[in-house]
Structure formats: structure tokens, C-alpha cells
Amino acid sequence: MSDQSDHTTPSDDTSLSSASSPASSPTELDVTPMEITEEQKATKTIAEIAVQITKAMVAEKEGKKIKKEKKEKKEKEDKKDQDVTMSEPTDNTSSSANSSTNGKDSGNKPGFFTAQIAPKVDENGLTRKERRTLKIKQKQLNRKSEGDGAPGFVLKTGHDLTLKDLRDLVVYILTETPSLPWVQVLNKFKIDKVLMLYASGLDPSLFHINLRSPDAHKPIDWAARAAQEGGPVTELEALKELLPEINVVKAPGDKFRIFSPTNTLLNVPLSNSEKVKREKEKHNNKAAKEKKPENYMLSLEELRESDFPIPRYLDSTVSDLQPGWTETLKLPKTSLTPPPKILIAMDCEMCRTAIGSELTRVTLIDHNGATVLDELVMPENPILDYLTQYSGMTAARLEGVTTRLADVQKKVQEIVDYNTILVGHSLENDMKVLKLAHPFIVDTSILFHHTRGPPYRPGLKWLAQKWLSRQIQANIERGHDSAEDALACMDLVKLKLLKPPGFGEYVQDQESLFSRLTRFNVPRTSALIDADAFAGQAATTTIRTATDQDVVEAIPEAIQKHNFVWARLRDVEINHGKAPTIVLSEGQMVDTGRASKLSSRDKVQATEEEIRQGMRSIDQSLKRIIESLPARTAVIVTSGQGDHREVSEMQHRQKVFTELFKTKNLSEIPEEDRFTEEDEQKLAEAVEKAKSGVCFLMVKGE
């Protein structure tokens, strides 16, 4: 075949010349080359081209075959050389070689070559390392060649969006992670920053969304619906232009509960390698080797993360104490060996006054379980709510009490000094109402783990039942007893010191989103802007705010400095009457606005004008925030969940009934306090509905 292709085919001109020889007949002489028609010329040209193409195809095929044969031959020779290298002894070790050939294993004896295993290559002849390098270069090339297209989001229709999806979207945009199946991020590498806004209170019903409709599973043009249906949503004038499409998003939970939306958004699963790494660190921890209470004290960073008041000598940013505050004095070193520290457990009870939470009782328990201080305190301001179910305080108990905060501070400091380790549960709340800064803290809410991991903290009641087999806080009518709670804390710490490392802990399978963003090739910085700093423990920067106005003013600087910013807006929730009264286990109140100023029995539905006011407020807040953002900033706005007021009310009723049923027969419980099977069904339906919130997605243009 190759020989034929090397010879050219005689042309029609040559054939005609031969035909015009003298031996030809006269009739043949009449046909000359000059008489060939144009059609014949075209046919001749096409034939020549076809022959050339055939030759080229044959040559290419033969070339590939030869190249393949050479490659296979070379691989066989290389393998043969490698086998020889692996078995051939050096010149000065022939005796060792002979012993090997006699059936003895040479092992790693001197004089033998070590086998060098060639790295595996793919069909293109590339090793794994080379493929990885090529992939990185290709991504860099893609980044440069994206052209003038603007970044943006294209969502997959029919996908049920969840809060985990939104969290994963943040990680995907800011890091080198696999693409997400539910969204296409156009020109991803042009997005410089991500802002996530948690706007609680925005419910699908406000946007006239029927959760049972197929429309709930795709982006919705809410502005068009608002024009037709009307209602408070029409107050969102700026958002009609900035965020014209809305999506339903679902929070996690089970049949009777909605799991924390913020926990879902701000925590990500640990990788297997990170789990192994953390297990090793835990076993190498000094506290795991030496069972001393000092090894369980919170570090300065942990004190900051949990929002403890910190003494000035530990925090250079604090220049002076605020009015009414005091701190444990630092003692000078008198010897190379400091005296051992003693354990004192503390628990405080509080009530709600015109200015917030104020102290009503403080109890100190020593290492032996003896009460060394138990003092009632009269608040400085008028009491609005005794919080009896949490504090056990009543007007009768405080009648005639003259001890004030300053008096009890002095008594506490006579017992608690620089050689004291204070023990308590969520002790930062007690320290704040006592207005005391102390450097050495062991906190049982951190020492022992919640089964669901951080940022959840276990309740003291659960810890006492789980690890001490003890019932505390059992009497709802009487409320908590600070002496009982302080003793439980002390006994939990003593038990921890007796048990092996890891006692009371659970394997953590998640970490903070802020931490995850720092663990990539190019670490990403972050900021959290909220009234509650606890959720942002691992953020690069934490900014405490009291109002939505504070949030709006804090975002521009934060987004300039950081890659990721998380912030919370509360005005809709507050004006809608949805903000729950947040009462910690010790009774401390967290002011969330209008709704928090009402007890659960006093709360009323917000008027339509109040709801409209909340919508106008968030509309202007979002407008100002988005206008302040730099170009190419991705914006994710979500409510996290829907209207949970009915769920909260029913869960409270269920809890009251459960506590009553522990001490009373069903016949002794009033009808209005019972929680029936019908109530359980209503609760399940309310939970399922309240899991659905809303979200908006956008990338700010140039």
C-alpha cells in the first residue's frame, strides 16, 4: 500500500500524447488535449484532490501505527532495564548476589539497588502531579479568558433549596471546591467578596407564596405578585429593582423542632482528615495528661469568644472599668512556685428591670459542697418581671432586702481572689450581672459537650441528669435554686477530674464556617456583625450591634477588609412581633426589641401598619447596604425560617405539660395545661410550615 502511494498516477495529458503516435489510427488523432471540455477539466481536478486526500489519510494512519510500535518497544526495554536494575548486585557484592540466587532473600542488604517504582501515568503520559499542575494552570487560564461576561447565579429548576445549600455556596465561591449541582455560578472567579444577610421575620406568606404550589420550587417574580395581591410587601420599593426574584429555602429539623438556622449557616461538616488531626491534638493535650483544674480553665481567646468580661491586666484594649464594675486584683509573684488554686462554684439569679437584667441573688459553693455565700440583692431599678420560673424570685422574697450590687461585690471579692478558679454554667452571664471581671474560669457548658456540637451548649439540667444522675430545676412553680445549680457545677467539675480524658465529650463532626474559610491555600478572612457575638467565635472580626442602623453602618468597612461578612437584620422580626423573648437558663434576658419587652402571655399580633413599618425599614436597610458594596460582591439574603410564633407557643405548652406530668397524675392537671395527641399533630404541621423561609441571590455589578 505504501509503495503504491509513492508513485504518481499518469495524467490524462500523458495518455493522450501516447495516443497521438504514428501507430495510432486517424480517428484517434482527431482527439487532442486542446479539445478537452471545461467539465472534463473539473472532473480531472476533483479526481486529483481525492487521490491526494487518500494518500494523506493512509500516511497518517501508517505514522500513528509506527509511533505506537516504537512506544511499546521502548516501554518493554525500559521495563527490562528496570528488572535488571532491581536484581543486579554491585561489583563488590558478588557474594551477596550469590546468596540471593541460592534462595536467600537479600532484603535491604548493602550493595543491592533499591527498586525505584516509576509513577503511574495516564493515557496522555502525565503523572498525577503533572495532571494537577495542568489543572491549576487551566483554571488560571479560564480565569483570564472569561471575557466580559458578568458574574451571576443560574438556579436549577425543581431543586428544593436548603440553608445548607446557601452555606455551601459561600464556601464554593470563596474557595477551590467542587461545583454545586443546584446552581451555576457564572464567571465565579470575578466574584471578590460574599455578604450573607440574615433577615429574620421575612415569611413566604408575606410574598403571597403557596408552599404547596410547584412555583415554590423555582425562582419567583415576587414584585409582579405584589402588584396584583397588595399587602405589606408593596413597601419593598427598592428591593423590586435590586432583588426581583425570591426563592423558598428550608431550614433543617425533625417532626417537632426546627434546628437552629444560624447554626446550619455558620457551621460546616469536618473533613475526615481534619477529624483525624483533631483527635490527635486532643490526645496530645496537656489537660488529657494532667488532671488539674488549671488545665480546664478557659484561655484568654476562649474568654473573648464567649464574651466574658476580662480584667484590664489581661486585655490591653481595656483602659478603664465602666461605672459600677470591678475586677479581681492581680497578686504579685512571691515565689517561684505559686500556691495551688482553689475551686469556688458560683451561680446568680436575676430579674428584668427597666434597664434589662439585674442581680437578685448570688451563691458561692466551695470544693466540699459547703455554701460560703448566699445573698439576696435588691436591684437599683424598678422590677418589671421577677422571672420566677427561672430565678425563683418573688416580691415576697425580696421584701425588706437592702443589700445592693456594690455591697455583694465586696463580699464576693473577700472570697474570690487571684488564687481562685470560678466554676459555673454559662458563667459569662453571671459575671455580667455581677459586674465582675475574673481571669480564671472553668465553665461546664464548655467543659462538657452538647450532643450536636458547637455552637450549641448543653443545659445544666441535662448535664446533671446525664452525668450525675441528679434531678435539678424540677419545680417549675418554685423556679431555679442558685445553690442547687452551683453545687451541680462543682460536682460536674470534680467528676471530670476523676474520669479519663474525653469524658463528657462527643466527637465533633463540624466546624465553624469562619474557621473553614481560613484553611485553604489562600486563607479567607471574615467578619460577623450581630448583637450576639457567640455565633462568630471564629470570625476574624466580631462587631457587636444593637440596631439595624448599627449593622448598616458597620458593613461597608467590614466588607472592604474581609472576604466574607455575615450580618443580621432584625427590624421585620421585631415589628412583626416574631422576635422571641430570649431567656437563658439562668434567667438573663436578651433584648431583641419590641417583642422582647412583652411576656409570652402579653404578646399581641402586630398591626398591619407595624408590619409595613418593618418592611419599609428593611427595604431601606438593604438598599443602603447594597449601594455601599464594592462591585463583584455576591449577596445572599435569607430569613432562615418562616413565622415560628405558633411553633414557639405550642412548644412552650408542651414543655409545661411535660414538667407537670413528672410530678402529677393526668387527672390532676387542668385541661388548659394538657398537651393532647391532637395538639401534637398541630405542632408537627406548624413546624413543617415554619421551616420554610425565603432567600434572595445577586451579584453587584460594576
Image (cartoon, rainbow, N blue to C red):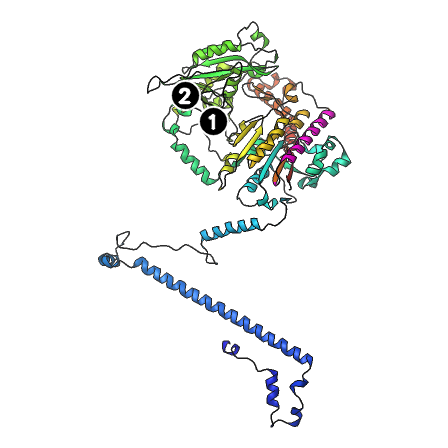
Residue 633 in picture, x, y percent from top left: 61, 39
According to the picture, the residue beneath numbered tag 2 turns out to be: 494
Local packing at callout 2 (Cα closer than 10 Å; few below 14, some 14-19, many 20+) is some
Q: Amino acid at mark 1?
A: Glu
Work out which residue is located at the far top of the displayed protein and give it.
Answer: 400
Q: On the picture, is 324 further left or further right than 94?
A: right
Compare residues 175 and 193 and report the one nearer the observer.
Answer: 193
Work out which residue is located at the far left of the displayed protein and give it.
Answer: 95
Labelled pair 1, 2 in contact (Cβ < 8 Å): no
Q: Quadrant of the C terminus?
A: top right
Residue 505 in picture, x, y percent from top left: 45, 29
Res. 302 mark: 1
Q: From the viewer's perspective, is the residue at label 1 or at label 2 nearer? A: 1
Whether residue 196 is visible to the viewer of this picture, yes or no, is yes
Secondary structure, magenta segment, majority class: helix
Q: Which residues are magenta?
A: 608-632
Quarter-of-image position of residue 572: top right
Q: Amino acid at mark 2?
A: Lys
Going from N to C along the chain, the mark reached first, 1 or 2, is 1
Residue 65 vertical placement versus 694 (above, below) = below
Work out which residue is located at the far right of the displayed protein and give it.
Answer: 228
Residue 134 vertical placement versus 283 (above, below) = below
Local packing at callout 1 (Cα closer than 10 Å; few below 14, some 14-19, many 20+) is few
Residue 613 in picture, x, y percent from top left: 71, 26
Residue at x-position 57% and y-position 82% = 10
Q: On the picture, is 270 further left or further right than 419?
A: right
